[in-house]
Image: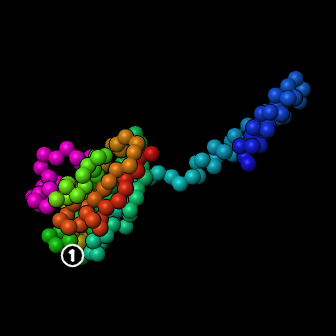
Amino acid sequence: MKKYFFLSAIALSIISCGGGSKEQAQDATTTENTEATTQETAPATNNDIKLTGNDQMQFDLKEMRVKSGEKVKLTLTHAGIQSKETMGHNFVLLKSGTDVAKFATDAISAKDNDYIPKGTDAVIAHTKTIGGGETTSIEFDAPAPGTYDFICSFPGHYAMMQGKFIVE
Ligand code: ZN
């Protein structure tokens, strides 16, 4: 409807060209401002992400949206009480096209490297692995617009602990 009114205002301005067009032009401007305001209140991206894992092997977010071209700060909290050895969690952001299952399999044998396979080029950013009651945070540049997978690469966790990282 707003678009219709906006177009109408332009049409009327053209039709009435030469007389009284100033008022019509103001109407059009008002409509345009309203649309801009509406866009600003649309669901926003958030580059300050707080992600929580628990003892039930779950992340509280299945999807996160960030704005491209800006820094992302991600804070991972382990809300459980189990140790890093039995219920460790990390956040691993993978490049597009990564075989997530294969990456997770390779990660199993990388315990001494925070479950990040040595020599991998599939990781955009990752936190260290933490246990119950711990918090860790990282900062990194948002990658190019697109949809990426994030997982916890602790052995056996990725199937439950994964989601989409969307850059807009
Ligand atoms: Zn985990």
Q: Look at label 1 and name its amino acid.
A: Gln
Residue count near mark 1 (Cα–Cα under 10 Å), binned few <14, some 14–19, many ≥20? some
Q: Specify whether residue 119 is in view.
A: yes
Quarter-of-image position of residue 158: bottom left
Decide if ligand 1 comes within 8 Å of the CB at mark 1: no
Nearer-the-camera pick, 72 or 113: 113
The residue furthest top is 18
Which quadrant is home to the C terminus?
top left
Say whether residue 3 is left or right of residue 80: right
Q: Position of residue 19 (x, y in %)?
A: 90, 26
Q: Position of residue 46 (x, y in %)?
A: 44, 52
Labels in figure, total: 1
* Magenta highlight on residue 123: yes
**Depicted 59 relative to depicted 39: above or below:** below
Q: Which residue is mark 1?
A: 82
Q: Specify whether residue 26 is in view.
A: no
- Residue, x 32% and y 54% (percent of image)? 149
**Depicted 41 relative to depicted 17: above or below:** below
- Residue, x 75% and y 37% (percent of image)? 7
What is the span of residues highlighted in magenta in the rendered image?
Answer: 106-126
Q: Position of residue 128 (x, y in %)?
A: 20, 57
Nearer-the-camera pick, 154 or 34: 154
Quarter-of-image position of residue 54: bottom left
- Residue, x 85% and y 29% (percent of image)? 15
The residue furthest right is 19
* Magenta highlight on residue 104: no
Element at badge 1?
loop
Say whether residue 52 is left or right of residue 12: left
**Depicted 161 relative to depicted 27: above or below:** below
